[in-house]
Image (tube, rainbow, N blue to C red):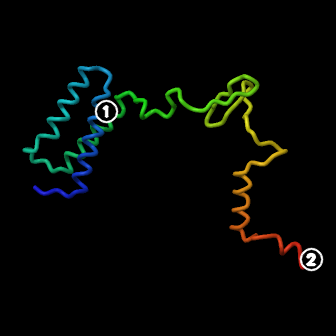
Amino acid sequence: MATSPALAAQVRHVYRELMFMAKHMPKESQRNKALTELRTAFRDTKSEESIEDRLKKAEARMSFLRITTPQTRRRRNHGDGSGTWVYRDGKKLTESNGTLRDDKGRVHTNWSGSNLDPCSVKRHNVSLRRAGFANNSHAKGFF
């Protein structure tokens, strides 16, 4: 039975994902049971089911395992202790929803009214050029 390379790649991808999730199940008895079920299901080629039907069953099993398997460090969004910390007046500022805040909850930024954010200036200039304001010679006149 010949299979297309794309279908074979999809089968390998689903198998690897299922193996990863089965290996990270919390209880060893569940882990061993899931691994043996997975191996026998993928090795059993004598069945009359088509490969597409078996892939649908495997993807259903994968969605169930995603729900029941606890997230690993690789799948979590927060870091493992490494990162960047900002200190102000000897106190560490905490990050809340992607913005640094001081102990009173105010957003901390290096940019104020006395200095300009270089990224904002660059974005402003790009927007002006896109809108057609290449320079200000139209406002100066001939002088």
Q: Where is residue 114 in the image (x, y as percent from the top left)?
A: 84, 44
Residue at 70%, 27% in the rendered image: 87
Rendering quarter of residue 65: top left
Residue at 38%, 27% in the rendered image: 70
Residue at 73%, 34% in the rendered image: 108
In-image side of 86 versus 19 (left or right): right
Question: Which residue is disc 1 drawn over?
Answer: 21
Give the class, few, some or many, for how many residues have Cα within 10 Å of label 1's Cα (few <14, many ≥20): many
Rendering quarter of residue 33: top left
Report how far apart the C-alphas of labels 1 and 2 lie in the structure.
72 Å
Rendering quarter of residue 73: top left
**Residue type for callout 1:** Met
Residue 15, relative to residue 72: is it above or below? below
Between 62 and 76, the residue placed more toward the observer is 76
Which numbered circle lies on residue 143?
Answer: 2
Residue 127, relative to residue 24: is it above or below? below
Q: Position of residue 56 (x, y in %)?
A: 25, 46
Q: Where is residue 132 in the image (x, y as percent from the top left)?
A: 73, 71
Q: Position of residue 100 (x, y in %)?
A: 67, 33
The quarter of the rendered structure image containing the C terminus is bottom right
Q: Given contact means CB atoms under 8 Å apart, are the residues at marks 1 and 2 in contact?
A: no
Residue 136, relative to residue 110: is it above or below? below
Between 118 and 22, the residue placed more toward the observer is 118
Which numbered circle lies on residue 45?
Answer: none
**Residue type for callout 2:** Phe
Identify the secondary structure beneath mark 1.
helix
Q: Which residue lies furthest to the right in this view?
A: 143
